[in-house]
Amino acid sequence: MDLYLLLAPVLLIPVVWLLRFAGCTHFTTGPTTGSGVPVKRINCGGPAVAADASKGETLGWDADSATAGTAGFGLVGRPKVTDDMGVPAGEVYETWRVGPSGPGGLPYALTLAEGDYKVTLKFAQLDTNPNIGGRFLVQFNNAAPFAIDASTSVHPLARKFDNDQAVHVDSSGKLTITFQEDPQMGGGTFPFINAIEITK
């Protein structure tokens, strides 16, 4: 048998360990494991929404308390937001908060118990305005921001798309999610968010 084939698994061990720690951060992407029990829900840009008992929900959606940007219902006369199957996506997709221009962005500051969570960011483009719904950035605390690009999504106006992020909240209990313009977009497009759901 080839000596390389025998030694390859052994030689890969230090590489795997290096990759494990390269660029580690408190905020990582990808699905999380766990029970998926909601601990915080925000209906961005809209009022409180009661839990839907018919779906087994036990936690409702809090009214939006953000002060930056503009809250609203989007385009007048638009169709209801649907999922990929054409089924109504739900009340929380019918409102949004559009962030302001400039570097300050649209922050949501939350307090959570220390631990691992899944943050689901819920989006639905509610207007055909070309300055809303392009590429923008999302940042968790001081981690590197990542891009959301509504313009290239398979979902057109009045369709939903969600983004899941695995997040570790440290002993400070602070989690700030900031939506902001992408400076590489030549003036950028306004960021937006329809709802935020945090599960543990």
Image (tube, rainbow, N blue to C red):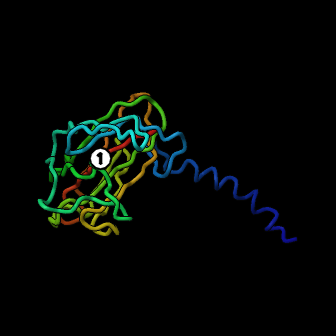
Residue 65 in the image, given as x and y percentages of width and height: 20, 36
User: In which quadrant of the rendered image does the N terminus lie?
Assistant: bottom right
Q: Which residue is at the far bottom?
A: 2
Residue at 35% across, 32% down? 174
Crowding near pointer 1: few (<14 within 10 Å), some, many (20+)?
many
Q: Which residue is at the far right?
A: 1
Residue 25 in the image, given as x and y percentages of width and height: 46, 44
Q: Quadrant of residue 51?
A: top left
Residue hosting label 1: 195
Residue 134 in the image, given as x and y percentages of width and height: 24, 64
- Is label 1 in a helix, a strand or a loop? strand
Residue 80 in the image, given as x and y percentages of width and height: 24, 59
Q: Classify residue 167 as left or right of residue 184.
A: right
The count of marks equals 1
Residue at 16% across, 67% down? 130
| Observer-nearest of 10 and 102 | 102
Q: Quadrant of residue 55?
A: top left
Image position of 2 with respect to 113: above or below: below
Q: Quadrant of residue 197?
A: top left
| Observer-nearest of 78 and 31 | 78
| Observer-nearest of 23 and 174 | 174
| Type of the residue with mark 1 | Ala
Q: Which residue is at the far front?
A: 54
| Observer-nearest of 171 and 24 | 171
